[in-house]
Structures are given as structure tokens and as C-alpha cells.
């Protein structure tokens, strides 16, 4: 038992799982943080990204590594388009008193978009499961076995998360985004172009979701309706880490990865979901604003 | 005088002509009226990715039947038309759909939906309206409690039989120790409930016995435990989703046990695509069909499915769906659309299908043996029981 | 709060008559449709007692539904239904009472996802417990027929609507609204905020528990994962939001609109209906941010203005 716990194998799995959760949650956090909208269609964007990679690989033999930036860019473009077409108008009309209604309506709106995405894809591509085998070789380092595609997911997802975190803390545009996340009105007063920040957060939010989909498609099978579990995972992570808190999200994602692996190792696979949701509920009851609580000003 | 006679003759002639036209028109219209067959199928929701193998089979059958001029309804051929609704992966919705099909759409015949919960949910509706349906993709010991009457279950993959047969097969392969991993969903949980006592009776050591919830994303902890146990056989009682997860993580951790059983998933053409042909080879799974020369039509069914859909049929679900259609066809050809006569035929006759003979006692098919297949060089071969085997079990050589 | 006008009273009576007379049409399919509508009419107003009036949006209300169903399934053929169904409501209410205290300290979107997590936690706990007991799935043989289920649901729908109407117009309801606007301010004004929230939470749980119990009789095959379906929670929210408003009329409109629309769509456009549903939702939110009640108010204003 002890040697299992100390082995690198569990650590590797926890990191792979955690990094993918982190990437999925990242975009969700940015969209919520800047616009206070709960994108319940986020997991479906991941699904679309997976289909993008799948078709690129099956029809054109394009490796997911090459497809990744293209699919991510496409995702970002969709995000910008959706922002310009739909949400900019909605957000412009918001006043402090109607902010609550915006949250409710955005929930419904994204829910409608989610239904549309799932079912249009089901109609176009059939509801069949899709999967492909890519980079399935297993490498051993010490006593840790790593499937190549899982290692790749860890590196790419982890790398992108770190990059975005650095962007938010170093780059001017990133700092502007953080300003909008923390205090929207104050940010616009000091000259931040809020519209541009919102557009950027939609782009990064949707783009990272699509990228997560490409990575996911290497690891598991998916169908038009497999987005929902990713949406759930994303929400659990961002709430646990504190809304709008990107670092918190990364830590929460890793924590979930750890529970999924080490928690099961210490107890039993039967309790896997009970542990995950149980930890979430208990954590939130003890820390009502997330683990790294930093209360966001509600409008 | 002559004029009157002529007119009378022409009147009689025209009446005769009209009567003839009307009579033949009636017969023409009857044969021409399409035969409406209704069913529900999950096209959206969490189960939508499992139903295509059954829906495809239904569609293939309809195409072939219509190409022959239509389904034989007590002597007359009628073209088949489907009335399909989406049950959204919800059994309550399936109940509503079958109620609608029977009372509102008033279809001529019904086919079964996909999955055990759906079969069981609609059984009371069929009972109430005395509408016989040949079930297919349903397997649970609970089926035996369904009042025999208007639904029958074609599969032999019932969990208690799976328990005894799997143990017998393991014994034959001289397996001394096993690890059992099970999804808690009904079918696999039932198998676990039956196989473990059988294993104990046979003196096979169960070194690991673990269950997991259906939304599991990582099996590393459990599989590390299995690897350390160093067993002869691993029984991964998985559903399609986790069957792929199991295969991939078994490969990563190097679970090279020679007997690898994965309950559901590998009978679908999707499995080798998802895990790679090399990994799929050697996996044993539940199915009781394979194209065999002894089974009339089995090769033809296989070939036509591959031709139309570009991939293998699901050796379990597609075969079962086709069998249920063959049984229905036979019963309707014999009795037309008289539901009581159809019911009597299905309940008592022995049928010839692509899986050999089928006969029902109560709700269960008592002829088809409970069997297992194994991937060998990319093709599924029946490896148990010997009576219908198309190949011999080969130990799995890693993933 | 406007008192319901003559039009509304008339509509309400017509609705009651429709519910009472539907079974006489002898069409099982229509009765099934009626049952579906009644089920949502029983769930949504109860949800509104909590989430509309206090602003604490629950995304996990299916947990009460599921608990109620589980109680019926586990006491099947041991407890008579007239005991099991109210017990289901009590169980749900008791659970709400137990978790409500700590849970309601969590606010805003945190509360939303907390309730979701809670529902999933209960779901997976029951799943683990069932499997530890060796249970695979549970089947209810000998369940009452559709008509009996229909009448039970009609009673629950009536109860739910009356509950919302009563709470909405009462001093308790006004207290809830005040804490929705500003919880701290309400507290300083003497509103017993913590107690009120908890009472609302418990009240909102009881009827959904009984609804779950009754619906278990309809589908007769109990698989934990399918009964604790998150889509139930989401649909309730969608219906309430589509209806809009603060009182009883909103949920009624929202339920009728979405339930009947879905019925029409799945029966008439089997291939496209989900796509149509999604499109209608999107268009609806964009055009009618205040829901159907908002639309009615706009018409009325236009009417009086001219």
C-alpha cells in the first residue's frame, strides 16, 4: 500500500487528470470572471474540439498536435463571433439591478446553445461513439509507466495553464483582464477597454475549451452528448478554487486529480465519486467562497 | 327495343367493369398500403451512442424486406414503413412512446427498444394492450419475473448463466486466481453477483474484488492493485464507456494476465477502433453469434451489414436485433396481423435464425447457449461453448 | 402584487376542469401527456418557493425527487403507498432541514453549484450503498396504473401551486423577498434571515420528494443514476425562468409553454425536435428577458396606454 502511494504512477495519473480538468476550468473561469455568466455549454465546446481533432485525423491524417492550434483558433473565433453577435448586446444593457437576471438568462441562453450544439452534431455526425488510436505507446521511466498520449496531454494542458496564468500576471492585457475580473466599474474608470477584455476572455475561454477537446480525443471516446461531464467538472473546479481565481482553479483541479487517484487508492474505487463530490461539498461548506477565497464584488 | 338492350348491356358491362376495378383496386390498395412498424430508440442523451448498432440493424432489415417486395403478412406482401420516436435515453419516455404508437399512431407492429430498462418499462404497456413484441437487447435475471405473455427475451446472456459458464470456461483454462472489477450499473453488477459465488464453488481464488461508479475517469489505483495480485484472469465487468478506459490503462500499467474478460463493449466494432487492433486481440467478451456455415443467413447478414455500414455489426446487439426480426417475420407470415395468433406462434414455435434455433419457454430463449467470443486477428470467434465454437481460446499476449 | 383578475380565475377554473376531464377522453397517450405536465406543475412552484423568492437558486432539486423515489422503491410491498408517499415527502424535507443550515451560508453561484454537488453526492452515495448491499437495479412489480398515478400527481400539483401562492402572499414571503434584495439589510430590519431561508428550503423539498415517489410508480425500473437526473433540476429552472415573474402565474405559464411545446415537438418532429427546442430557448431569452409574465405585462401596458 505505502509503496503504491509513494509510487510515481499515481502521481502521474493525478497530474494527467488534474491538468485536463484545469484546462477545461480555465476558460470557464475567465468567462465567468469577466462577465458573470455561467457557460453551461462549456463542455460541449470541448466536445466540438474533440470532433475537430477526430475529423482532422480520420479524414486528412492530420495529427492532433497539428490540429490543436487550428482547432483552438477555430474555437476562439467562434467565441469572438458569439460575443459580438449575442453577448455584447446583452451585457451592454445590464445595470446593477438587472445583473441577477443576466445570470439567470445567460444560464438559459447557454443551455439553449448547449442543446443546439449537441443535437446538431448528433444529426450531422450521428450519435455514434468516436475514438482513434494515436501515440498509444507506453514508456517506462523508473517504475512509472506512461502512455505517450497521456504524457502529451499533461505537458500541453499544463503548459497552456501556466502560460495563461503568467499572461494574467505579467502581460498588460492579462492584467487588464484581472482588473475586470476583480472590479469591473473601477477597471473601466482607469481606462481599461472592457469590451476588448471581454472579447479576449471569450476567445481564450472558447479556445482553451476546444484545445481541451483535442487533448481529450486522444485519450477517450466521445459522442455528441459527452460534453456534460466536462461542464460539471469545470464548474466543480472553478467553484472550489474560487470564482474568477485562475490560480485557485489550477489548484482545485490538481486537488480533484489527487482525490481521484490517491483517494481511491486509500479507500476503494467504489467510493470514487462519493469522495469527489463529498470533498467538494465539505470544502464549500467550510469555505463558502472557495478554497482560495477572495470575494468578488458582485455588481 | 334494341337500343334498350344495348343500353342495359352497356350498363351491366360498366357496372361489371366498375366492380372489377373497385375489387382489384381494393386488393391493390391493400397490398400497396405500407405496413407501419413502430418503436422508440434513444437518439439523444447518454445512451444515444449505444443504440446505433440496433437501429442500423432495423434499417438494414427494412431495406432488404422492401427489396423483396415487402414483408409477408399472411400471404400478402406489404412494404414496411417505420414510425420511430426518440426516447431521450429515458425509460418513462419509452413508456409514453409505446402508448402513443399503440393508441394514437395505431401502428401495425412494434419492435423492441434498446436496453433492459426500456424493455422492462414497456412490458406493462404491451400487456395492457395485448400487443406482442419480440425483445432483443435486454438481459437481466429480473426478466424472468416479467409476466410471460406479450414480450420475450431473445438473448442468452443472462447474468446467472454467464456466471456459471464463465466459471466453467475459466476452469477449463486452468485458471487458479482472478481479479474482478465491476461497474455498479445493473447488468455488470448482476454478473458480479452471480460469478463470484460460482468462482468460490469452483475453488478459484478471488484475489481482488472491486466495484466502481459509472463516471470513473481513472482506474490507476484499482489496476495497480490488480497488477500486484498477479492473477491468471482479470474479469473487467465494464460497460462500453469504461471498457475502453480499462483497456487503455491496462496497457499502460502492463496488465499482462493471459485471460482478459471485458463484459460489454468489445462486441461492437467500435472497440478495436478505440483501443487499437493489437490491444483488442485476445480480449474475451459476451456474445453468442458469429457467422457460421451451420447458421443459415449468418454470413449473408454479416456481409450485407458490412457493405451498408462499412464496419462489422455488433456481435451481440446487432445479431439479437436481427434474430428478433426474423422471429417476427416468421410469425407474421404465418398469421397475418392477428395479435393473439402471433403471440401464440412466438410462444410455442421453434424458429430458425442467424443464430441457429430459438425457442421460448415463458419469456426466455432456452435454446441458444450462453457463449463468449474472443478477438483473434481482428475477428471475433466464438470460443465457448465447444458446441458452437468457431475458434479456440488463445491466451492474451499483452496489450 | 396584483390580485388575480377575473381572466386568471377563469383560466384557473378551466385548467382544473381540463385536468379533471382529461381521463374521460379515454386516450392513454393524452393522459400520459397530462401526467407529464402535472409533474412539472408540481415540481416548479415548489422550487420557486426557495429559489425565486430568496434568490438562492437550487440546481440540485432532483435530490429531493430522487430521495422520495428511493424511499418508495426500498419500502415496496412492505409499506402501503398511503404511508410511503407522505414519508417520501418527509424524508426529503428532513434532508433539507439537515443540510440547509450549513448549505445556505453559501451564496450566489457558489450555492448553485453546491446544490448540484450535493445532488450528485447523494446519488453516488446511494449507488455505492446499493452496490454494497448487492443490489443491481430495483423493479416494482404490481404498481398502480396510470390513472391512479395521474390523480396523485394532480393532487401534488395543486398542493404545490397553493403552497407557492400562500407563501408568495404571506408575510413570510415578503420577508423572503426582502432577503433576496439585500440579505444584510433585511437582517438589520429584524427579518430572521437564517430561519426564513431554512424554512423556505424545507418547504421547497417536501413536494418534490412526493413527486419522485409517485413517478417511481410510473417507470417501475429504478436505476439510481437515471432517477437522480440533473436534467430534471435544469428543466425546472428553465420552466421557472421562461415563465418569469414572482408569483404563481409565472411557473404555470412556463410549465405549460415548455412542457406542451416539448410534447408537440417530439411527437411531430422526431428528428429535429431537440434542435428546435434549443433554438426556441435561445430566441426566447433574447426576445423575452422577462419571461412570459413580462410579455403579458408588456401587452397589458400597451393596452392601457392606448
Image (spheres, grey):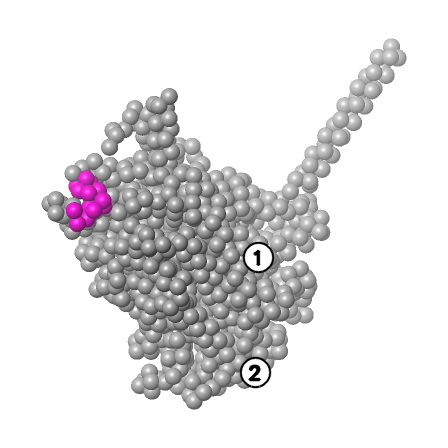
Do the dots labelled 2 and 1 sit on one chain?
no
Q: Is residue A232 visible?
A: no
**Label of residue A253 in the image:** none
Return the x and y of residue C223 as percentages of the image width and height: 38, 59
Image depth: mark 2 or mark 1 in front: 1
For mark 2, give the secondary structure.
Answer: loop
Stretch in magenta: C172-185
Which residue is disc 1 drawn over? A125
The structure residue drawn at horizontal position 43% and vertical position 48%, both measured from the top left corner, is: A87
- Which residue, as the protein is rendered here, is positioned at the far right? B2
- Please state the chain letter of the residue tagged with numbered disc 1 in the rendered image: A
Q: Residue B394 bears which disc, if any?
A: 2
Quadrant position of residue A294: bottom left
Determine whether, in the image, residue B167 is placed left or right of residue C123: right
Residue A258: x and y, percent?
A: 34, 74
Q: Main secondary structure of the magenta part?
A: helix
Task: Give the residue furthest to the bottom.
Answer: A142
On screen, residue B235 above or below B81? below
Q: Residues within 10 Å of mark 1 (few under 14, many from 20)?
A: some
Q: Is residue B199 magenta?
A: no
Amino acid at each position: 500500500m505505502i509503496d503504491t502511494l509513494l509510487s510515481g504512477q499515481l502521481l502521474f495519473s493525478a497530474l494527467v487528470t488534474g491538468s485536463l480538468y484545469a484546462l477545461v476550468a480555465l476558460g470557464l473561469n475567465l468567462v465567468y470572471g469577466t462577465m458573470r455568466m455561467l457557460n453551461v455549454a462549456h463542455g460541449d465546446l470541448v466536445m466540438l474540439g474533440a470532433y475537430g481533432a477526430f475529423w482532422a485525423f480520420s479524414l486528412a491524417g492530420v495529427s492532433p498536435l497539428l490540429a490543436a492550434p487550428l482547432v483552438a483558433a477555430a474555437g476562439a473565433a467562434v467565441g469572438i463571433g458569439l460575443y459580438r453577435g449575442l453577448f455584447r448586446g446583452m451585457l451592454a444593457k445590464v445595470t446593477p439591478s438587472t445583473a441577477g437576471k443576466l445570470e439567470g438568462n445567460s444560464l438559459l441562453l447557454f443551455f439553449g446553445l448547449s442543446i443546439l450544439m449537441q443535437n446538431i452534431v448528433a444529426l450531422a455526425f450521428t450519435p455514434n461513439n468516436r475514438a482513434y488510436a494515436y501515440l498509444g505507446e507506453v514508456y517506462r521511466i523508473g517504475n512509472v509507466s506512461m502512455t505517450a498520449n497521456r504524457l502529451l496531454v499533461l505537458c500541453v494542458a499544463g503548459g497552456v495553464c501556466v502560460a495563461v496564468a503568467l499572461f494574467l500576471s505579467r502581460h498588460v492585457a492579462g492584467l487588464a483582464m484581472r482588473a475586470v475580473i476583480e472590479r469591473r466599474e473601477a477597471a473601466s474608470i482607469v481606462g481599461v477597454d472592457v469590451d476588448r477584455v471581454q472579447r479576449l476572455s471569450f476567445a481564450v475561454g472558447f479556445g482553451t475549451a476546444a484545445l481541451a477537446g483535442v487533448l481529450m480525443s486522444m485519450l477517450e471516446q466521445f459522442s455528441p452528448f459527452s460534453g456534460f461531464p466536462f461542464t460539471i467538472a469545470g464548474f466543480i473546479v472553478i467553484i472550489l478554487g474560487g470564482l474568477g481565481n485562475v490560480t485557485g482553479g489550477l489548484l482545485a483541479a490538481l486537488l480533484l486529480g489527487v482525490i481521484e487517484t490517491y483517494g481511491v487508492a486509500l479507500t476503494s474505487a467504489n467510493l470514487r465519486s462519493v469522495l469527489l463530490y463529498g470533498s467538494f461539498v465539505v470544502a464549500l461548506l467550510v469555505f463558502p467562497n472557495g478554497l482560495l477565497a477572495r470575494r468578488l464584488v458582485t455588481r | 327495343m334494341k337500343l334498350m338492350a344495348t343500353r342495359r348491356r352497356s350498363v351491366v358491362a360498366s357496372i361489371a367493369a366498375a366492380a372489377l376495378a373497385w375489387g382489384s383496386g381494393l386488393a391493390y390498395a391493400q397490398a400497396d398500403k405500407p405496413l407501419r412498424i413502430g418503436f422508440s430508440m434513444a437518439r439523444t442523451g447518454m445512451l444515444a451512442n449505444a443504440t446505433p448498432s440496433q437501429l442500423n440493424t432495423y434499417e438494414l432489415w427494412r431495406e432488404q424486406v422492401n427489396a423483396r417486395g415487402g414483408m409477408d403478412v399472411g400471404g400478402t406482401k406489404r412494404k414496411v414503413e417505420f414510425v420511430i420516436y426518440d426516447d431521450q435515453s429515458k425509460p418513462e419516455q419509452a413508456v409514453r412512446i409505446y402508448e402513443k404508437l399503440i393508441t394514437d399512431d395505431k401502428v401495425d407492429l412494434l419492435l423492441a427498444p434498446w436496453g433492459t430498462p426500456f424493455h422492462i418499462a414497456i412490458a406493462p404497456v404491451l400487456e395492457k394492450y395485448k400487443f406482442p413484441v419480440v425483445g432483443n437487447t435486454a438481459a437481466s435475471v429480473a426478466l424472468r419475473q416479467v409476466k410471460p405473455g406479450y414480450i420475450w427475451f431473445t438473448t442468452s446472456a443472462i447474468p446467472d448463466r454467464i456466471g456459471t459458464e464463465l466459471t466453467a470456461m475459466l476452469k477449463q483454462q486452468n485458471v487458479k486466481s482472478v481479479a474482478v472489477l465491476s461497474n455498479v450499473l445493473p447488468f455488470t453488477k448482476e454478473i458480479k453477483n452471480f460469478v463470484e459465488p460460482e468462482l468460490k464453488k469452483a475453488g478459484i481464488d478471488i484475489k481482488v474484488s472491486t466495484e466502481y461508479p459509472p463516471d470513473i475517469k481513472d482506474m490507476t489505483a484499482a489496476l495497480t492493485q490488480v497488477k500486484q495480485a498477479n492473477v491468471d484472469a482479470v474479469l473487467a465487468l465494464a460497460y462500453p464507456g469504461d471498457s475502453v478506459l480499462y483497456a487503455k490503462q491496462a496497457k499502460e500499467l502492463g496488465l499482462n494476465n493471459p485471460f482478459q474478460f471485458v463484459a460489454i463493449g468489445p462486441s461492437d466494432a467500435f472497440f478495436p477502433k478505440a483501443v487499437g487492433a493489437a490491444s483488442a486481440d485476445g480480449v474475451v467478451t459476451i456474445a453468442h453469434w458469429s457467422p457460421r456455415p451451420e447458421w443459415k443467413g449468418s454470413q449473408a447478414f454479416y456481409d450485407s451489414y458490412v457493405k451498408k455500414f462499412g464496419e462489422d455489426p455488433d456481435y451481440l446487439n446487432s445479431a439479437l436485433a436481427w434474430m428478433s426480426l426474423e422471429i417476427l417475420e416468421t410469425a407474421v407470415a404465418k398469421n397475418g396481423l392477428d395479435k393473439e395468433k402471433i403471440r401464440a406462434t412466438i410462444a410455442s414455435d421453434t424458429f430458425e435464425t442467424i443464430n441457429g434455433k430459438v425457442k421460448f419457454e415463458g419469456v426466455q430463449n432456452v435454446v441458444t447457449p450462453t457463449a463468449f467470443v474472443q478477438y483473434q486477428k481482428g475477428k471475433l470467434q466464438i470460443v465457448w461453448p465447444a458446441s458452437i465454437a468457431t475458434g479456440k481460446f488463445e491466451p492474451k499476449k499483452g496489450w | 402584487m396584483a390580485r388575480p383578475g377575473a381572466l386568471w380565475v377563469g383560466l384557473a377554473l378551466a385548467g382544473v376542469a381540463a385536468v379533471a376531464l382529461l381521463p374521460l377522453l379515454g386516450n392513454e397517450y393524452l393522459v400520459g401527456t397530462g401526467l407529464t405536465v402535472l409533474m412539472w406543475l408540481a415540481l416548479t412552484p415548489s422550487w420557486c418557493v426557495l429559489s425565486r423568492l430568496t434568490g438562492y437558486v437550487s440546481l440540485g432539486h432532483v435530490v429531493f425527487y430522487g430521495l422520495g423515489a428511493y424511499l418508495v422503491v426500498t419500502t415496496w410491498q412492505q409499506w402501503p403507498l398511503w404511508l410511503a408517499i407522505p414519508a417520501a415527502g418527509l424524508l426529503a424535507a428532513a434532508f433539507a432541514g439537515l443540510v440547509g443550515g450549513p448549505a445556505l451560508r453559501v451564496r450566489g453561484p457558489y450555492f448553485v453549484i453546491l446544490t448540484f454537488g450535493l445532488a450528485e453526492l447523494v446519488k453516488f452515495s446511494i449507488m455505492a450503498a446499493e452496490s454494497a448491499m448487492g443490489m443491481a437495479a430495483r423493479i416494482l412489480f404490481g404498481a398502480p396504473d396510470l390513472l391512479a398515478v395521474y390523480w396523485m400527481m394532480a393532487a401534488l400539483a395543486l398542493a404545490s401551486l397553493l403552497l407557492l401562492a400562500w407563501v408568495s402572499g404571506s408575510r413570510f414571503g415578503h420577508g423572503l423577498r426582502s432577503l433576496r434584495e439585500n440579505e444584510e439589510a433585511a437582517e438589520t430590519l429584524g427579518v430572521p434571515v437564517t430561519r426564513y431561508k431554512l424554512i423556505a428550503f424545507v418547504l421547497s423539498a417536501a413536494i418534490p420528494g412526493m413527486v419522485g415517489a409517485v413517478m417511481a410508480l410510473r417507470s417501475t425500473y429504478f436505476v439510481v443514476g437515471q432517477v437522480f437526473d440533473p436534467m430534471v433540476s435544469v428543466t425546472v429552472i428553465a420552466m421557472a425562468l421562461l415563465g418569469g415573474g414572482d408569483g404563481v402565474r409565472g411557473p404555470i405559464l412556463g410549465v405549460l409553454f415548455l412542457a406542451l411545446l416539448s410534447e408537440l415537438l417530439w411527437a411531430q418532429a422526431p428528428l429535429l425536435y431537440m434542435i428546435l427546442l434549443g433554438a426556441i430557448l435561445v430566441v426566447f431569452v433574447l426576445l423575452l428577458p422577462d419571461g412570459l409574465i413580462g410579455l403579458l405585462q408588456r401587452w397589458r401596458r400597451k393596452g392601457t396606454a392606448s
